[in-house]
Amino acid sequence: MAEAGARKRAFDPVVDANTRLLILGSLPGEASLAVGQYYAHPRNAFWRLMGGLLEQPDLHDRPYEQRLVALKARGVGLWDTVAEAERIGSLDTAIRLPVHADLPGLMAALPDLHAVAFNGGKAAKLGHRILGADGGRITRLTLPSSSPAMARTMAWKAEQWAVLAPYLAATEHHA
């Protein structure tokens, strides 16, 4: 039996009409849930990885709202594959009884969407299950998790995440 308060809920998606790349995690961890911000754990590499890709190396030091503005300016959206689930702690392996996010519904509302990137294996497994086998017009990419639980070097993660670069062109350059 799960302890009281173990049911966790995902945040609302961070997207707009210009979203071309949607990065999907599994479910926000405890540090993120506590402050209501995606990838808030200080050892999570997400904001450093995205800062490198966006050529904004100080991105992780900026206020959260400015980080979101920087992502949206380059056509990047954020969400999760799990709308809610039971979980003690932050590990994906502890997710129980997940309710899937409405990925097809969100993706249908994003006319410029070209790619979905799954941040980690659990997000990819659930995302592929939710979306089915046919990728259609949307490219699907599986990235190593930005979580500190994925014990790899920052350089290795950055090399793997570099596959996102073609989807990060400045928004004003696309019709």
Image (spheres, helix red, strand yellow):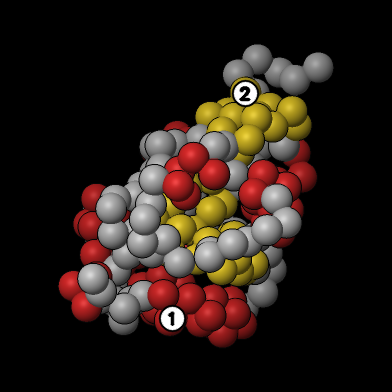
From the image, tell me which residue sits under label 1.
165
Q: Is residue 76 left or right of residue 173?
A: right
Question: What percent of the width, then of the height, locates residue 60?
Answer: 34, 64
Badge 2 local density, few (<14 within 10 Å), some, or many (20+)? some
Q: Amino acid at mark 1?
A: Ala
Residue at the image point whose x is 28% and y is 53% from the top:
17
Q: Give the mark nearest the N terminus, 2 or 1.
A: 2
Mark toward the viewer: 2 or 1: 1
Image quadrant assignment for residue 84: top right
Asked if the residue at tag 1 contacts the one at tag 2, i.e. Cβ–Cβ closer than 8 Å, the answer is no
From the image, tell me which residue sits under label 2.
7
Image quadrant assignment for residue 85: top right
In what element is the residue under mark 2?
strand
Residue at the image point whose x is 46% and y is 58% from the top:
22
Question: What percent of the width, then of the height, locates residue 43?
Answer: 52, 60
Residue at the image point whose x is 63% and y is 35% from the top:
100
Image quadrant assignment for residue 175: bottom left
Question: What percent of the width, then of the height, locates residue 108?
Answer: 45, 47
| Visible residue check, residue 16 | yes
Q: Amino acid at mark 2?
A: Arg
Give above or below for 90 relative to 50: above
Give above or below for 79 relative to 140: above
Per the model, the C-alpha gap separating discs 2 and 1 is: 35 Å
What is the tally of numbered marks visible in this picture?
2
Question: What percent of the width, then of the height, locates residue 126?
Answer: 70, 47
Q: Is residue 93 left or right of residue 46?
A: right
In what quadrant of the picture does the N terminus appear?
Answer: top right
